[in-house]
Amino acid sequence: MKLVYRHPAESEIGERKLVGYFLFGLLVLLAAGVGTTAGLLLVYSTDLPQIDQLERYRPSAVTELFDGHGRVIGTFALQRRVIVSYDDYPEVLRNALISIEDKDFYRHSGINIWRIAGAAYRDIESGGKVQGASTLTMQLARNLFLSPDRSFYRKVQEALLAIQIERRFTKPQIFTLYANQIFLGHGTYGYEAASEYYFNKPAKKLTLEEASLLAGLPKAPQYYSPITHPERALKRRNLVLNAMLEDGKITATQAATAKSQPITLNLQKDPNSLAPNYVEEIRRYLEAKYGSDQVHEGGLRVYTSLDMDLQKSARQALLDGLAAYEKRHGWHGKLLNVIAQGQKLEKYEDPDWDAEPELNGYTHALVTRVSVSGAEIKFGQHIATLTPADTAWIKLKSKLSEILHPGDIVYVRVLSLDAGAGGKTHVSLEQDSGAQGALVAIDNATGDIKAMVGGRDFNLSKFNRATQALRQVGSSFKPYVYTAVIDQGGSPDDTIVDAPVTFQTASGPYSPHNYDNKFEGTITLRRALAQSRNIPALKLADHIGIKTVIEYAHRFGVTSNIPAYLPVALGSAEITPLEQTSAYSVFPNDGVRVAPRYITKVTDYEGRILEEDFSDIKDVVSSRTARVMTSMLREVVLHGTGVAASKLPYPLAGKTGTTNDFTDAWFVGFSPSLTCGVWIGYDEKKSLGEKETGGHAALPIWMEFMNVALAGKDPGEFQPTPSPGTAVARKVDTPDVAPGDGETH
């Protein structure tokens, strides 16, 4: 074959050169693009967080307080977050979240190129910024390390971090980090906390429609809030269900059934509202020991001595007792009016409304409208009408419209709550004149504080009257006098003369008298204590020395300063309810004092024990003295000033206390297992009113609580009183010398 060479035409040579130039230029542009991209990536990555931080990352977690049965009674947190594992999130929630947020989560390596390209194209068309293409991993990177701004710079960093995260962690680990971190509205972070808040149950128990609702929240938690925007939340939930159906995660029947369900929330009540004074005591202790950051971000687990059921009973008993006191003294009026203060009715929000009202609970409400037939009131989301029948105790001589006006803040008891489908809210008008109270209940054997109520309304006053209020204890101090006598060899059958007496003092003669201004003559010590006679108590204290009596009170655990003058025997000493209640637990404890405790154990985020509290225990008096005193205080309940409590079907003992001018009313008493103290009074030294004694004002509260606290339980029996043996009853002779003044009961 003969080859013939043909010289190319000039046009062909030109075309080849042109192609060469084009290819060269393309290579130059490609190189420039690669270089530019590499340079940009270098710039964007220079200030990226070190990804190994994520291996040590622990998000801020809520510190939880548990009662003795493991139920949450309080939380401390900057962010409401509960950390759980991958297996704690049910498959239905994982499927819902992945279907709506990141369908290719288990297939991509951190970024989804096609989603990014599509989103970028749409945003270029609309002139917006790059958005809407983030994978779960990219969202995690943004939430943990980057700012929320939607710039191109942040998006590139987000993608780079996502790739690194995917290289270091498994998909379940990434999902768990995301699910524990994401904000889901109303202060909740993570799906476990959100499930507990919106549905009052752990995420493990979520239904399909509930899981779909929560899965739709990350896009815009406030906009799709099922609380404030239920219609939007419903549409978003159904969109999630559609996505799950498209992905084959649910059947058409399941989707249709779930879509037909309305949004039903069961909002978690604020656990801190059950025992706010108790929780506050623990907060102060923990912050002093561990620091504020650790308490509010460290996810501590604090195991307390409180019993949620007893706490509810204690609060109800105190509020019921205060309501009964108010009704005994009639309507005072003088209501706060928000309109008079320059506020608008539609803008007013009362602190009481932060928590959902409870049946038989008490709350402040706003009068919104008044008519001939009644007054319409509002509290939170509830509306009710007060009629003359709801205010019968006031015994109106005029129309209801003459005592209530729009803008008035009234105090009401919730008798029923609307529950939809014809449900109705019904309340009764109560009164809050400022009278306060405190109740403390302590387990005799362990010193555990089982219940503590420090006042009528924590929202109005944070002052804890159970631990901070130093109040005169009245005749509830007398058991220390009799304890000193019995411990030094006395007998409850010894006699003393209840008769007029004058004590010579440095300031002149002092002639005390009994509460009833009568004298009983020669009586036993048992009867003198049961009937709370003042003259015998003063004679006994003078006989053994008031300093000795005070020394015994301190042995019982009273730390308050007590001046050494004789009227202390009648209760002029100022002691807190917690101290007085704890001291009384020595009697049923066979003379042993167990120091009261709030906390049994504290663990850290990892479950390591940080502290365990074992109460201090010490002998105070002999078992003989304790048993004799228990029998004498039992007589107070059976035949003395606390006789009203004898109708309860349990072995009970205790002592009333009333101060001069009825400024303080007390009852402190116990069963074989539980000691409870109740105080009633005003924060200022103001009389509760004539005849408002400890037996009249405080004892009914104590009885209501103890009746519930002991119901269905084995109440036990008091230790038998020791045999008197050959001891002979004797008469106690006392000199008539002592300073002082005052009369108590």
Image: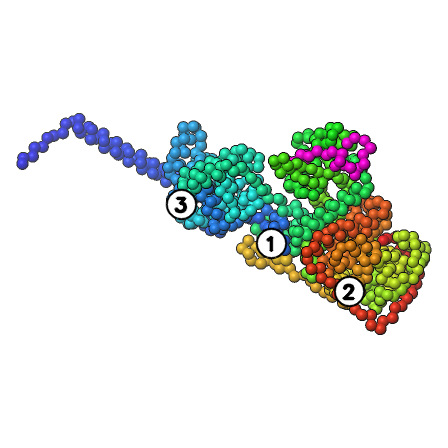
Give the magenta range. 378-400
Query: Does residue 263 sit above or below 572 in this rendering?
Result: above
Q: Gap in Å between the C-alphas at discs 1 and 3?
A: 37 Å
- Cβ atoms at labels 1 and 3 below 8 Å apart: no
Q: What element carries label 1?
A: loop
Residue at x 67%, y 43% (from the top left corner): 359
Image coordinates for residue 520, horizontal then vertical, percent = 92, 58
Q: Gap in Å between the C-alphas at discs 2 and 1?
A: 34 Å
The residue beneath circle 1 is: 70
Label 3 Cα crowd, 10 Å radius (few <14 / some 14-19 / many 20+):
few
The single residue placed furthest to the left in the displayed view is 1
- Cβ atoms at labels 2 and 1 below 8 Å apart: no
Please name whichever residue, 127 or 573, is drawn nearer the observer in this view of the structure.
573
The residue beneath circle 3 is: 106
> Three-letter amino acid code at disc 1?
Gly
Image coordinates for residue 257, horizontal then vertical, percent = 48, 39
Query: Does residue 488 sit above or below 212 in this rendering?
Result: below
Residue at x 77%, y 64% (from the top left corner): 626
Mark with earlier residue (2, 1): 1
Q: Is mark 3 on a helix, strand or loop?
A: loop
